[in-house]
Amino acid sequence: MGQDQALTIGAMSRATGINIETIRYYERIGLLPAPPRTRSNYRAYTSIEQKRLNFVRRTRNLGFSIDEIRALLCLSDNANTDCCEVTEIARNHLGETERKIADLQVLADELRSLIASCAGGVSVLDCRIIEAFAHA
């Protein structure tokens, strides 16, 4: 897509895989600057906004929070900034991701144990899984 070729919000949605309402939301919260409007009052997006939306989509897919993405975008908007801050945000996010994985592993182990404790063939009233959930 050329720099001078403008996309409507629908075309931008198709190009980035981001829902139209989500694009509007990103504009409202400042992750994406409001684009200029055509004479017909349609949003006119360019490759700059497409690149930014792809960045937001990718970071959201990696689990970064809106605040983390906002900080990363701010840093990327200042090309001469040292990337140490970017590394620190990524490092902190990795730590949080690893904590979540550890918590999920504990959860999976607990579920395995509960499932193993159920012999089946009993009424729900006598089900050890239901009993464990009720007494947690």
Image (cartoon, grey):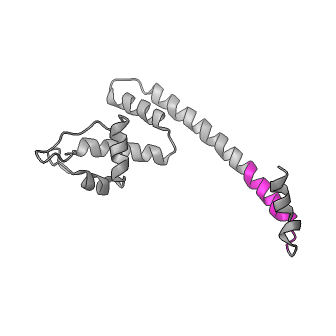
The magenta-colored residue range is 106-120
Q: Nearer the viewer, residue 61 or 36?
A: 36
Name the spot of residue 115 as percent of width and height, x first. 81, 63
Residue 109 shown in magenta = yes
Name the spot of residue 67 as percent of width and height, x first. 47, 33
Q: Assign the magenta stretch its main secondary structure.
A: helix
Q: Residue furthest front?
A: 125
Name the spot of residue 78 as percent of width and height, x first. 33, 26
10 up-or-down from 70: above or below:
below
Q: Nearer the viewer, residue 92 or 68?
A: 68
80 up-or-down from 66: above or below:
above
Which residue shows up at 83% across the image and 58% down it? Answer: 113
Which residue shows up at 61% across the image and 37% down it? Answer: 96
Image-based side of 80 in relation to 85, left or right:
left
Place residue 81 in its image quadrant. Answer: top left
Q: Residue furthest top?
A: 81
Which residue shows up at 79% across the image and 59% down it? Answer: 112
Residue 53 shown in magenta = no
Place residue 128 in its image quadrant. Answer: bottom right
Image-based side of 135 in relation to 42, left or right:
right
Image-based side of 105 in relation to 68, left or right:
right
Q: Nearer the viewer, residue 112 or 87?
A: 112
Name the spot of residue 87 as percent of width and height, x first. 49, 31
Image-based side of 4 in relation to 96, left or right:
left
Which residue shows up at 43% across the image and 27% down it? Answer: 83
Place residue 118 in its image quadrant. Answer: bottom right
10 up-or-down from 41: above or below:
below
